[in-house]
Image (cartoon, helix red, strand yellow):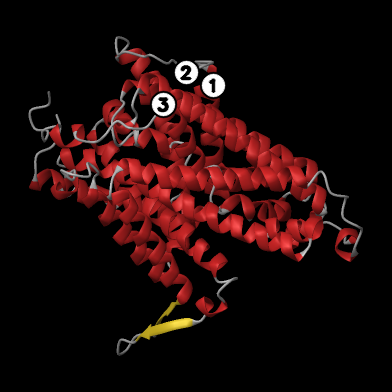
Amino acid sequence: MEPNRAPASEESRLVRGLGTWDAALLTIGSVVGTGIFLTTSDIARVLPDSGLILWVWVAGGLLTLAGALTYAELGVMFPRAGGLYHYLREAYGPLWGFLYGWIAFLVIMSGGIATIAVGFGKYLASFVPSLAETAFAVRIPGLPAWEISGIQLAAVGSIVLLTGVNHLGLEEGAWVQNALTVVKVGSILVFGVLAFLVPAPATSEAATAPASPVPMGGALLVAFGVAMVATLWTYDGWYGLTCSAGEVRDPARSLPRGLILGTVAVIGLYLLLNLAYVRALPVAAMAAEPRIAEAAAGRLFGAAGARLVTVAVLVSAFGCISSTILYSSRIYLPMAADGLFFRSLAAVHPRFRTPVRSLWAQSAWAAVLALSGTYEQLYTYVVFASVVFHAAIAAAVFVFRRCRPDLPRPYRTWGYPVVPALFILACLLLIGNTLVDSPRESLAGLGLLALGLPAYALFRRQGSHPH
């Protein structure tokens, strides 16, 4: 036992109540939010060819599956709350674990919750138009008025409500998350299957509009890289189960199965939806429709179909908020126990056996980001840093195989060493592409990460730390 580490009694009070079914649904629920109903439109603008659009979703799915196959080995080696924090800490030292947790709390997880919640509010506004109006304005002398819309208030309301549900216990949070995931998966399957049972849409002016020319040579590779970034962020969250590994009932069996099966299911759902988009809309129309799922449903099934898809997106977003709140709040508990974050966040509620202070601290910051309207800009800044962490975590499989070969590995990465090596290579290519395509955002992301260095020094000075 590490002498300077806080007792593990708090973490051990978490309930190991997630089975394989729960694990798979948590993986699906953590990934499928609003992105798949929007992102293909962005991809069509940079990659205006239906075949290439489908291939980029296949490539993104295979890369995500490579990550899941790799992370599953790490998850069964360290089946504890916090997942990614532990992998980095054990492989490279406490600083790297802290830096991931720092940027996760500051932007990646909290910003992700805020982004999905505001997306939920925007879709809700299509049923309650008054939400799009300014609810009130905060006026500070000498500064521009800070306008708060009903959409932002709806976003905060969804965050508070679902944090409250997860506060009450793992079983309650998992039940709500599972129910919402089953509904959203069912909705996608019904939409995708019916899209091929109805007659093909009639040719219209939109259908005959010329598409942009397909880039060739090096330009095609750059465009494919940009499109891959969009798909990977739509697949983001696939690793969420590893953060809740401390609550998986039989991690040696259920964690790899839930992670891999859930990822495969997401890939299938995403390909089904994109095949439906391709059947419903020509590429030029896809690029012109930011809410592509509604546009495709409108052409296939009429206005009523588009309305039903809007309801499905609402359910999907609500479920994704729930699952993200559930898993991401577990990252900060071990950090706090190690003396590398606020000590109070290590507390587990004696009755509900959930990390209630981590839950509410994260959600409070997510609510602030949702109200501030700056979450989208902040989230863009950490794309670069996040991919760097994914590459480092995948490399940890090689580190542990060499330095700690005796650690129990009830599951070993399928296709090792090729699969994790390909995942790392793809991450490095995306890092390079992001540096070239968005140098300002990449450097800003590194700047936010660098702010963690003085914070790390401060936490080490104020409290105990591992090793």
Can residue 424 be seen here? no
* In the depicted structure, whether residue 171 falls above or below residue 308: above
159 or 66: nearer the viewer: 159
Q: Secondary structure at mark 2?
A: loop
* 423 sits left or right of 386 in the view: right
- The location of residue 149, given as percent across then percent down, is 46, 77
- The location of residue 135, given as percent across then percent down, is 43, 82
- The location of residue 152, given as percent across then percent down, is 44, 71
Task: Verify CB contact (< 8 Å) between mark 2 and mark 1.
Answer: yes
222 or 183: nearer the viewer: 183
Three-letter amino acid code at the position of disc 1: Val
3D distance between C-alphas at marks 2 and 1: 8 Å
* In the depicted structure, whether residue 270 falls above or below residue 68: below
* 218 sits left or right of 153 in the view: right
Q: Residue at x 29, y 42 (%)?
A: 330
How many neighbours does mark 3 have within 10 angstroms: few (below 14), some (14-19), or many (20 or more)? many
Can residue 388 be seen here? yes
Q: Secondary structure at mark 3?
A: helix
291 or 308: nearer the viewer: 308
Q: Which residue is mark 3?
A: 255
Which of discs 2 and 1 lies nearer the camera? The answer is 2
Residue 156 quadrant: bottom left
N-terminal of the two: label 3 or label 1?
3
